Every structure is written in C-alpha cells, then in structure tokens.
Image (tube, rainbow, N blue to C red):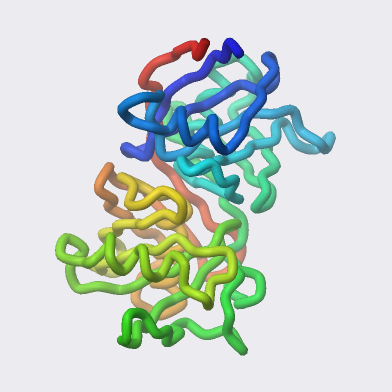
C-alpha cells in the first residue's frame, strides 16, 4: 500500500494525518501501532483520518486513532491540525469547517494569523453521558485509587476526562496516578487524566495522561475539561490560559453552552509510506 501522509503537531501533541478523501486507505490496529513507533515508524501520539461526510450538513468526517490502534471519540489538538490540513491540501476553500466525529459534531474556524478556534460543543457533566459511575452530578467525586481517596471532577468533551487538582504539576505523579486512574472501574470506557495547577483565576498549568497513549505534550479536550472543572468548582473565570508542556491554549466557557478552544498548529513534513 502506497500511502501519502502529513506529520503535524499542535503544541507538541503530534499526529500523522491521512487524506482518505482522495486516496484509498486501509487501516488496522496493528498497522497504526507499527506506524506510531518512534524508532521504526512515523512516530505520533494519534493518527487522524479525513473522510467524506456521511451527512449533507457536514464537510468531512474526522476519525482519531491512538498510538495503540484504538479508535477514540475526540481530540482538540487534532481538530486544529485537521482544519489546517484540509485547507492546505485544498480539500476545502472555506475557513469555517464543519466536521462529524464519533464524539459529536465540531465547527472549526481558521483565523487570519493561522491559529484555529474550535467550537468543542457542550461539556457533558451528567455521569451517564461521560460515562462515569455515579448516582448524581457533582462538581467533585471521591474515588479510591491505590488505597487512598482522590477527589476528582469528571467531564465529557466527546471523550471522558478525569481532572485532579494538584498544588504543583511539576511534581505530580502523572505516570503512576495516570496509569491507575485511566483504567479505574468507575470509568467504563477508560479515561484521560488531567493534573491541574491553578496559578490564578485566569491561568492554569496542566499535564495530561491520555488513555492509550500516556502523557502527551498537549491535550485540547483535556484543557477544555480542566477549565470546565475549574469553573463548576468556582475556581476559575470564564476565559482561561492553559499552559501545557507544549505551549498555551485559550479556553472560553460561559458556564453554559459550548466550549471554545483557540491555539496554534504546525506542519512538520509530508511523506509517503510504501
């Protein structure tokens, strides 16, 4: 199989982007895991697949695969790269792009300065919609992890997120706790785990352990989930700068309605797999 692809990143969260509109693409979990290898393959956190839409009111269908080959519902940094890719590949001329994903519909806006704003939709706070095992909605939930009780927020952004507040993200046990919480029985579809340090009501620092990937340089849906968690707990204001290891995102949420995320993207190179 001869396959053209583009390597991109959003704040260091890197992607292999594949055009499934103008070329035939055959994927399998084994192939994706092979390509994701950073020594013997392309190397990436996730593979993004551009496909024709299944509905007339959408421009594209957008599918996301983790480095372990599992398909997931949503990825905010990937959505920004997706928007830049379809414009650069001349698959669309409009700078407002409507896409369907397994986690719901997204609307992407490419700004004149090259940054991309993504309408991420409404956050899901009802436990059954996240999904998360709890009797009723709450800003904080107690869960047992490795013999201790953690108080976490649970937020759905088309994919499930657990947000843990910490005093210092630099010393947070991201690998150990992230591994334990990712497969916690209260999250039936596993979960992305965010470690949030509040610098001020308009600024947080964040590290994210992504399910099926591990810690990444940035996570757009994780940034959205962290800000939503901060707002429902009355810790944050409605427009917040989120500093991730790879750089900054701006997240806006009024406390109702849709979350908006703005940030940069970059193309690294184009290649062909043979």
Give the residue at x 58% y 10%: 2
Q: Does residue 106 sit above or below 82 in this rendering?
A: below
**Would residue 41 appear left or right of 155 to someone viewing this image?**
left
* Residue 42 shows up from this direction: yes
Q: Position of residue 258 (x, y in %)?
A: 59, 59
Q: Does residue 216 sit above or below 148 in this rendering?
A: above
Q: Position of residue 68 (x, y in %)?
A: 48, 43
Q: Pick the residue in front: 19 or 97.
A: 19
Identify the image quadrant of the N terminus.
Answer: top right
* Residue 119 shows up from this direction: no
Q: Does residue 241 sit above or below 161 in this rendering?
A: above
Q: Position of residue 176 (x, y in %)?
A: 28, 65
Q: Pick the residue in front: 49 or 57.
A: 49
Q: Pick the residue in front: 251 or 47.
A: 47
Q: Does residue 18 sit above or below 235 in this rendering?
A: above
Give the residue at x 40% y 41%: 263
Q: Position of residue 223 (x, y in %)?
A: 40, 56
**Would residue 213 appear left or right of 22 to someone viewing this image?**
left
Q: Pick the residue in front: 156 or 59.
A: 156
Give the residue at x 69% y 29%: 51
**Would residue 230 appear left or right of 80 to someone viewing this image?**
left
């Amino acid at each position: 199989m001869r396959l053209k692809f583009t390597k991109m990143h959003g704040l260091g969260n890197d992607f292999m982007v594949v055009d499934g509109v103008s070329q035939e693409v055959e994927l399998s979990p084994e192939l994706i895991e092979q390509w994701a290898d950073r020594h013997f393959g392309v190397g990436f956190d996730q593979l993004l697949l551009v496909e024709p839409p299944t509905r007339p009111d959408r421009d594209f269908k957008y599918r996301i695969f983790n480095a372990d080959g599992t398909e997931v519902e949503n990825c905010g940094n990937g959505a920004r790269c997706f928007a830049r890719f379809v414009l650069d590949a001349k698959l669309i001329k409009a700078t407002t792009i409507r896409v369907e994903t397994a986690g719901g519909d997204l609307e992407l806006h490419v700004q004149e300065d090259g940054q991309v704003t993504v309408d991420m939709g409404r956050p899901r706070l009802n436990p059954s919609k996240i999904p998360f095992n709890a009797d009723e909605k709450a800003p904080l939930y107690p869960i047992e992890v490795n013999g201790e009780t953690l108080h976490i927020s649970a937020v759905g952004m088309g994919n499930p997120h657990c947000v843990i507040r910490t005093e210092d993200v630099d010393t947070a046990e991201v690998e150990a706790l992230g591994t334990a919480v990712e497969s916690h029985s209260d999250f039936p579809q596993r979960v992305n785990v965010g470690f949030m340090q509040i610098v001020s009501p308009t600024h947080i620092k964040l590290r994210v352990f992504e399910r099926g990937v591990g810690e990444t340089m940035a996570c757009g849906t994780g940034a959205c989930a962290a800000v939503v968690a901060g707002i429902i707990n009355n810790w944050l204001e409605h427009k917040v700068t989120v500093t991730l290891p790879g750089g900054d995102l701006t997240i806006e949420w009024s406390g109702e309605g849709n979350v908006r995320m703005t940030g940069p993207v970059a193309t690294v190179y184009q290649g062909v797999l043979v």
